[in-house]
Amino acid sequence: MFVAMVTDPVRFHEGNLWSTPIRDLGLRIEGTRLEPIITEFERELESVAITRLRPRCYLSTEWGVPFETIAIAIPFYLARPDLTALHAERDGYVEGFDRADILRYLRHEMGHVVNYAYKLYDDEEWVKQFGSITQPYSEEYRPEPFSRRYVRHLPGWYAQKHPDEDWAETFAVWMTPALDWKGEYGGWPVASAKLAYCERVMASLAERDPLVTDTELDEDVGEIEYSLDQYYHDPADALGELPPGLDGALRAIFQDLGAGDDTPPVALRPAAELIRRLEPELMGNVFRWTGHFPERTRVLLRYLAERGAQLNQGYAPARETSAVVGLTTLVTGLAMNYVQRGSYLP
């Protein structure tokens, strides 16, 4: 689950923070919850014999490693609890919501660091295992959920996005402490072969200095001129058209969830309120298991809430579990359609 608790988002909108350039917020890693986590991550590197390569961690707009550098960008909103809460409110999910999740992302980004530092992407066997790094990189990708050709680490079947991400995810699984990857992926020949390759390569690099040591930063937090308001601005039509034609599906969920003929009349709870309440958890979990981006799930859920209100759909309080199951199944099915076909309905 990706949701962070929103403590007091209102003060951003009422004060100067909302319009202040991000560079002027005084954000840094030192003295924040990130500092001990990065220290723990560095100990993990030593435990897998990565001693000649140390990435530079810095704050930026999102997770990433600029190509041909060894600098790991960490989202600036993770440096302060109030900014993390604001991000959860505005985006609906947080990539790095707690210590374990931040470490998960650091291991993934370290895979990119190793790849660029030693130019593994030029290695013939690397290309054979993962593909060419020159393949087009697109934010939109259509994963095959539960494919045994890829490891599972970050949500959304992220290894399937690009060969560079496939390697980074494989490396992260290999690096994860106490994970028995040989046992977990033993029945997955392709994914297991990638992990075995990773283990061989890392053993060969243990005593080698990196070829690339550049730590040039991309959008360092101290240079970001735009404000939080501009950063979170999202045009209403940015995610395309909403999926019409779902009224029948909503009615099918709630038509049998009243109190029943033999029960004294009870006030029905609005379906729209339930959908809005489910939004944070569904955004994260649907992304994890389908690859449907959380921001798209949010648009879908708000559309369903609007239609539920207009159709006056409701349920008896005692039937809430059934309503939750029905809505979760519907949204997951629609998300799978979109991931596989590019549309929610045929």
Image (cartoon, rainbow, N blue to C red):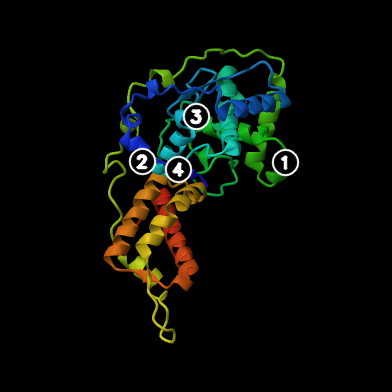
Which comes sooner in the sequence, label 3 or label 1? 3
As helix, strand or loop, the secondary structure at mark 1 comes to loop
Marks 1 and 2: which is nearer the front?
A: 2
- Please say if the residues under marks 1 and 2 sit with CB atoms less than 8 Å apart: no
Q: Give the mark nearer the N terminus: 4 vs 1.
A: 4
Quarter the C terminus occupies: bottom left
Q: Which residue is mark 1?
A: 180
- Which is more N-terminal, label 2 or label 1? 2
- The Cα–Cα distance between marks 4 and 1, rounded to whole angstroms, is 38 Å
Image location of residue 31, percent across then percent down = 56, 24
Q: Which mark is residue 10?
A: 2
Counting residues from the start of the chain, the first of labels 3 and 4 encountered is: 4
Residue hosting label 4: 7
Q: Residues within 10 Å of mark 3 (few under 14, many from 20)?
A: many
Q: Which residue is mark 3?
A: 79
Q: Answer yes or no: is residue 267 visible.
A: yes
Q: Rounded to the nearest whole Å, what is the CA distance between mark 3 and mark 4? A: 15 Å
Give amino acid for label 3: Ala
Mark 4 or mark 1, whichever is nearer to me: 4
Which SS class for mark 3?
Answer: helix
Amino acid type assigned to the residue bearing label 4 in the image: Thr
**Contact between labelled residues 4 and 3, with CB atoms less than 8 Å apart:** no
| Residue at 41% across, 38% down | 86
Which-is-in-front pick, marks 3 and 4?
4
The image quadrant of residue 22 is top left
